[in-house]
Image: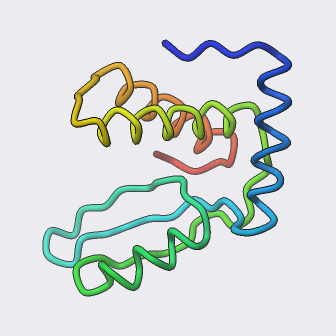
Amino acid sequence: MAIKLEPEQIQQLKDQLAEANRNSHFVIISAVSKKEHSGVNMVTDWHNFLNMKENNGENFDFHVIRDILPITTNLVYWAVAQQNLHTITTQGDQDDQAVNDLEFYTNKVMEENKVRA
């Protein structure tokens, strides 16, 4: 994967995620299309989950699969991948590596939380 972090960076980011976790804890959710009956599991925070449920509840059923995720190295990498992809798409660019990184680290978080991706 393209994301390289030093141990000091990982610890610093874990501390930042722990602080963010106090405001809006991390969860794994499922979103299932009411029309197509297909779904996806994703990592997000509680406030974003509530926002998705409120704004897209007519099209999707949202459920929490795992509540209050532990702050792990995989979650750190997921957060970095998420931010990288957000930055790239905000700039109007496309980057397959950023998408692949997010998918890879999302799957790692799912695995360690015993959720099938």
Q: Position of residue 8 (x, y in %)?
A: 85, 19
Residue occupying image coordinates x 55% and y 58%: 44
Left or right: 35 as drawn, with respect to 31: left
Residue occupying image coordinates x 31% and y 69%: 32
Q: Position of residue 48 (x, y in %)?
A: 51, 68
Residue occupying image coordinates x 68% and y 48%: 113
Q: Residue furthest left?
A: 35
Left or right: 52 as drawn, with respect to 56: right
In terms of depth relative to the viewer, which is nearer, 81 or 16?
16
In terms of depth relative to the viewer, which is nearer, 21 or 27?
21
Residue occupying image coordinates x 78% and y 23%: 9
Question: Does 90 appear above or below 23?
Answer: above
Quarter of the image holding residue 13?
top right
Q: Position of residue 115 (x, y in %)?
A: 58, 51
In terms of depth relative to the viewer, which is nearer, 97 or 68?
97
Left or right: 65 as drawn, with respect to 8: left
Quarter of the image holding residue 112?
top right
Quarter of the image holding residue 7?
top right
Which colour assignment does the render follow? rainbow
